[in-house]
Image (cartoon, grey):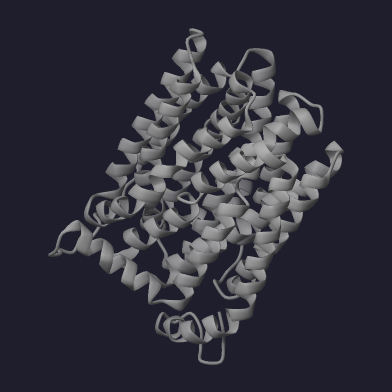
Amino acid sequence: MTKILTNFWTGIPALRSRNYRLFFAGQGISLIGSWMTQVATVWLVYQLTNSPLMLGVVGFTSQIPSFFLAPFGGVLVDRWNTRKILIITQVLAMMQSLALAVLALTGTIDIWHIIFLSLFQGVINALDAPARQTFVPEMVEKRADLASAIALNSSLVNGGRLIGPAIAGIVIARVGASYCFLIDGISYIAVIAAFVAMRVKPKQITARTGNVLQRLKEGYIYAFNSPLIRSVLLLLALFSLMATPYITLIPIFATKVLGGDAHTLGFLTSASGVGALIGGIYLSTRKSVLGLGKIIAFAPALCGTGIIVFALSRTLWLSILMLLLVGLGSILQISSSNTVIQTIVEDDKRGRVMSLFTMSFLGMFPFGNLIAGILAERIGAPYTLIIGGVFCILGSLLFAKYLPKIRQATRSIYQQKGIIPASHST
């Protein structure tokens, strides 16, 4: 057994670092609970309101803070101790889940409670997400293991996405959604303990002049003067706006389209988790950032195709297969984008640039959810997803068209960092 574990640690570069192993264990437990809460929340909202629009509203309120507050979170992360920030956000998130659990267990929960607590969680995420992205390089001992750590972090998220919804489906069907919230609240203890147990070198924080707005402006100028960062962020924003609302609308497909129940919802959500887990494992074993440009260009088209066929499907097995493709395309897009940006960004601007990544990724969720909820109310959920899938494919084709120019503009940065010789491309 010891030999098997040793081979596992050494086979995946990021797991050679003690801090990342602690994070891997604690976060793995916590994410299962987080996905249980996400499934329980959309199920409870739909049971309380029977409204696609309210699904969109709750999705909007849970993510809109990331759009407005994530850039300020990035400035804070560049100035403060990242680990302490993460411990605070995890404690607050635990309180939010336990509040949901108490309200649901006592039978007093109403839709406005869910909206308010979703907004509160969104504020937490606006700070937690850029801090978490920035903290990854601090957890790995070797810079060469960074790409593996980012991909493995995505695998963690989607491992939880695979297991959490499946457990949530069983729990909801047997004892109700309230116990999903309770399990999630307790699960935060694991990741908080992991952060506390880490031995991290103090982050070098360079003294800066200027106010917060000047720091924000500096981060924006730096990011959008880089052709690669700018293009990746814009594609990611389009992808988040048009592709991710499928998660919010899944309860409609599970019940009205496929004629299922909470178990069906768990199967569908877990299917996308399987695909994402496969993609995350593949990316975590890659030795180099080279070639990720092609993956970023291809992944939205794969995801968009899966969404379109899922929207047209009326059989459970085909829907599950298509969501597997959607999950695979999603993780390839998100994790590859993260890896490329983290590889080329300057350390003193990492927090602010990763806050823009959060803004492009999580910040576009609320608008996508709200638009999807409105459209689903008017034209139906299937047609809403088809429109999103088509836009994903168009975005993929446009990025692929400009990829040669992006490679040329970025080659010098890769050469300066010693990643490629002059004859290679991104």
The N terminus, quarter of image: top right
Image spot of residue 43 (x, y percent)? 62, 26
Q: Is residue 212 above or below residue 2?
A: below
Regarding residue 186, the answer to whether it shows in the image is no
Residue depicted at 60% across the width and 60% down the height: 333
Q: Residue furthest top?
A: 106
Residue 292 in the image: above or below residue 137: below
- Say if 313 sits above or below 241 in the image: above
Residue furthest out toward the front: 378
Question: Could you tell me which residue is drawn at 74 percent across and 47 percent down?
Answer: 383
Image coordinates of residue 21 in percent, x first then y, are: 47, 47
Horizontal side of 20 relative to 209 (left or right) equals right
Q: Quadrant of residue 65?
A: top left
Q: Nearer the viewer, residue 311 or 153?
A: 311
Q: Quadrant of residue 173?
A: top right
> Whole-percent x and y of residue 195?
36, 40
Horizontal arrangement in the rendering, residue 156 relative to residue 197 (left or right) = right
Viewer-proximal residue among 335 and 392 = 392
Instruction: For residue 415, say whether it is visible.
Output: yes
In the depicted view, which residue is nearer to us: 176 or 398? 398
Q: Position of residue 107 (x, y in %)?
A: 51, 8
User: What residue lies at 60% left-to-right and 51% top-to-bottom?
Assistant: 8
Task: Say left or right for 44 vs 329.
Answer: left
